[in-house]
Amino acid sequence: MEIQVLGGLSVQVPTRTLRLGTPKQQAIFAMLAVQPGQLVTVSELVDELWSDCPPRSAVANVLSYAANLRRAFEACPSGRGIIVRQRNGYRLDVPPELIDIFCFEAERSAGREALTAGHLDEARVLLGSAVTRWQGPMLAGIPLGPVLTARTVAAEEERLLATELLADVQLRCGRDDLAIPLLREVVARHPLREPAYALLMRALHESGDHAGALVAYDEIRTRLSAELGVVPGADIEELHRRIATPVPTPVVVAQPERSESIVRDGESAAVSEQTRQLKPVDHLPRAVADFVGREDVLARLLAETRRVEERVPAVHIIDGMAGSGKTTLAVHLARRLSARYPDAVLFIDLCGHGEKNQVEPASALVTLLRQLEVPAEQVPVEFEAKVELWRRELARRRSVIVLDNAASSEQILPLLPTEPTAVVLVTSRRRLSHPEVAPSQTLPVMNPEESVDLLALTVGRARVSAEPEAAAEVVRRCGHLPLAIRLAGARLAHRRNWRLADLAEQMAAGGPALHHLAQEESAVAKAFAASYEPLPEATRRVFRFFGLYPGKRLSPSAVAALTGLTVTEARAALDELVDRNLAEDLDSARYGLHDLMRQYSIELCVRTDSPSDRSLGLGRLFDFMLEAALRVADLLEPGVVRSQVIHLWSGRSELFEALGEPHAEWLESERAELLTMVLAAHEAGFYRHSWQLARALWRFCYIRGYFEDIILTHRDALEAAEAAGDTDAMALMNNYLASAYVRTGDNRKALDHLTRSVALSRDSRDVLRTARYRANLAAVYWWSGQLNESVTLGFECMRDKAYGEVGGPILLPNLGLALSALGRHKEALRLHRLHLAWARTHSDDFHVLNALSHIGGVRARMGDLPQAIRILLASLALRERTGHRYAEAEVRNDLGIAYRGLGRLVEAQQEHEVARKLSIASGERHVEAAALNDLGRTLRAQGREVEAAEMHEAALRLATRIAHPYEQGRALAGLAEHFAGIDPAEARRHWERALAIFRRMGVPERFDAERRLAETETTEVEH
């Protein structure tokens, strides 16, 4: 629930906006909303609504308004108990953080504290969030009495103070462009507010708009004089004096004692240096007209500049991959800083992309000194003398220097100033690191919104507005890389008849997107090549083979397996790629590539490496990943998985030493990569690796509830097994596919796949495997509502000696569930206890918690409720300890059933709701249907008939869709209960349908249905 008072009054509940009734009724709620948790008396409400002359019916009217509000809230599940009747008044029982005015006040206070502590970025975020909460005047449209009037006036003042504080923070961060609109809005609403005008003058002045600052001064001076007969305060007058009287730049500057090295090059040169006139110089390249985005980066750099510029020269290093917009950003930032550093704006390309054409520091110094208009004859020959002269020249000026495309820290160190009169912006494709240089800031690709804005500026906003989805797809295909977006935009700009969708389709058609991102001499691939070519061959090989890797997060061990390098060599190569911004370090042990860089990597690999070399690399990778997964699977299924998957590892042990001891969380962290590996191995023709890896992942996915992952991988792995002509593997994949379809409620597919498994294994020598498939078939019969068939097949299997090994983990629980559904609880309990004994004997936590769950469920249905609760809670505790989430939703629902039996209805409702959420998250639709039905029964026990019927209706729709007859019958019975008191004919119709299902299944619920149906018939006869 969200209560909004800033910009009107509204209450948002999960599915709608709550109707609050008449204006006076809304005023009553407003009184409660601005005082949450406090008693507001009836007399206070009367005074607020009728401050002058309340009518005789005032108290009765207030009580009526309050009752209407309470009914409106009670009709919403999340609104019950919100408005509390207490003694002679009412109280709104909600935490203040649900009301926007209190969120505003908390963020404003936190923002002020962050500013006091010097945390500008945090203060900007907090104050920005606070100010944007205001959507208009507080309680707009509500009739205000004395209390609400005072509250709105105070809140408006707090809003103004917060806005002014935010503007001040924006100015401290160098974001005058963001501060000015805020302040213009304030002075438009409050034309006599001096603090806002002072900030506006300062912002305009710092943005270079000195005339605008003077106009703002004239506005406030004129208004104060005309309306109040006063002059502006001292702060505004002092600011006006500073703006109107700029400090002149000295024309001739006498220097301290001269350098010996300068004297050696001639006394006259030194004299000329000291008397030379200083003229502003500007050597920045033309800034792009369509610069967009990067606001956070700019704010950070400007704030850092202001923080240090009085003490030391500000040096900012910006690194990033080719095409990320480093130079564009540096030039834009330099242009913004030039108003405060007006004497010199310099730019030099240090050509750091390659090894051959890098500009030496000595040559760079000559170029920069000449940009400062130092005569050629005054530039000394010795390197140290050049450095000294350069630094003296910078000390005489306020300058901005852009050192573009730096190759190394050593290249830029001699070019850095020593006095706090300059700002240096360094760009590099490498991450530069040196004790004398601040850490570099990596420039990421643009976010989706910035990317679309950049495309719009290139091709026209009308074209982007007409095809927003196609525009989003084009920039996504460009990987949100500014250079790529500009080239794509240029391609479209020259093809006026093309739609954006045409380019998006071409880029998605299967060919490399890089081919569409070239224009004359500019091309993304060419920019990437400049970073790739200087690399050592081993590092280039790692980069090329990166494109072969099927996933997105590559570990050093996987790189070593793929390339044949040692883990140490692989890690060194990866670090080199990261330093050159060809790869990204995703975390301490995982590396990735930008999408366009991956395409470039693939193209290089196909062009450079032979098919046999590529196939050999993939084979080593799949071998390694399969063995790594099997080592974890051995912990989850000791002895089982290796009996079905024969994989002899002959690779290097160092690959696993880097991974450490096998554990289930490794599978969790690598889950997305491993799923992709199954599909990639199939596509690449490594059929055995595909189905074996799917099998190795099965138990982990099953106990964690990742059933959709099982379907995805095993469906593909089944095709791989079929392509390999491996009958045993085909039977195995069908079996495990069925397990996931059962859990997600698709019983027909489960039955189909298990039938195929049994048929495929009929001639197999592995009797145990065939027995496993038939035992699983009994479980599918149970889920499908064929309970008698399930029990018959289950007992038949148990009598067969071949089932000795699978009886404990498979037959016992499945047969027990079927027996319990038939009402044969004592037999079911005996089988579940045998299952528990088997699990403890084999030290199998998964089967222990599973057996406990089933025993608790049976106990609940037998009426032994306290014992059921203890056992179910123990099962949940074991799940929490081991991380096995399998069937947790069912346990929660059974726990709710037990709580309901004891009359603990609130706890029961909570457990059913948790069960429903968990089942939706895991895709277990049959459990969701059960949770809906049991939630309905619990709501009915609370007297909430309408909501209970809604739950049963939802359960009926879901159970019908997934062909789950038992839950269909329960839903129909629940709806019959609902109709019993209001529509006997409809109740009878539902009882008849439920009874037909229960009789067909043979479940004990048929007896209750028969009794209730007879009661409805008797009632009709009596009427």
Image: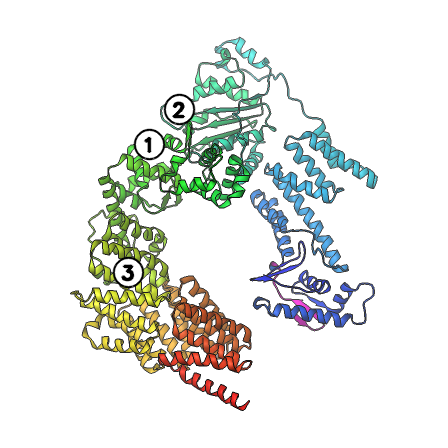
- Dot 3: few (<14), some (14–19), or many (≥20) neighbours within 10 Å? few
Q: Which badge, 1 or 2, comes first in the chain's sequence? A: 2
Residue at disc 2, secondary structure:
loop
Pointer 1: what residue? 535
Viewer-side label of 1, 3: 1
- Residue 806, percent from left and from top: 24, 70
Q: Is residue 94 magenta?
A: yes
The CA span between labels 1 and 2 is 15 Å
Q: How many marks?
A: 3
In three-dimensional space, the C-alpha distance between marks 1 and 3, rounded to whole angstroms, equals 42 Å
- State the image coordinates of residue 869 (x, y, percent, origin top left): 42, 75
Q: Is residue 985 above or below residue 655?
A: below
Which residue position holds label 2?
A: 358
Residue 427 point in image, percent of width and height: 46, 31
* Residue 573 placement: quadrant: top left
Q: Residue furthest bottom?
A: 1022
Q: Residue at x 55, y 89 (%)?
A: 1023
- Give x and y (percent) for residue 44: 75, 66
- Please report the bounds of the magenta region as a residue range: 83-97
The three-letter code of the residue at mark 2 reads Gln
Three-letter amino acid code at the position of disc 3 = Leu
Around disc 1, counting alpha carbons within 10 Å, would you say few (fewer than 14), some (14 to 19), or many (20 or more)? some
Name the residue beneath numbered marker 3.
635
Looking at the image, residue 360 lies above or below residue 995:
above
- Most foreground residue, 799 or 106: 799
Using the rendered image of the protein, determine whether residue 197 is visible from the camera's viewpoint.
yes
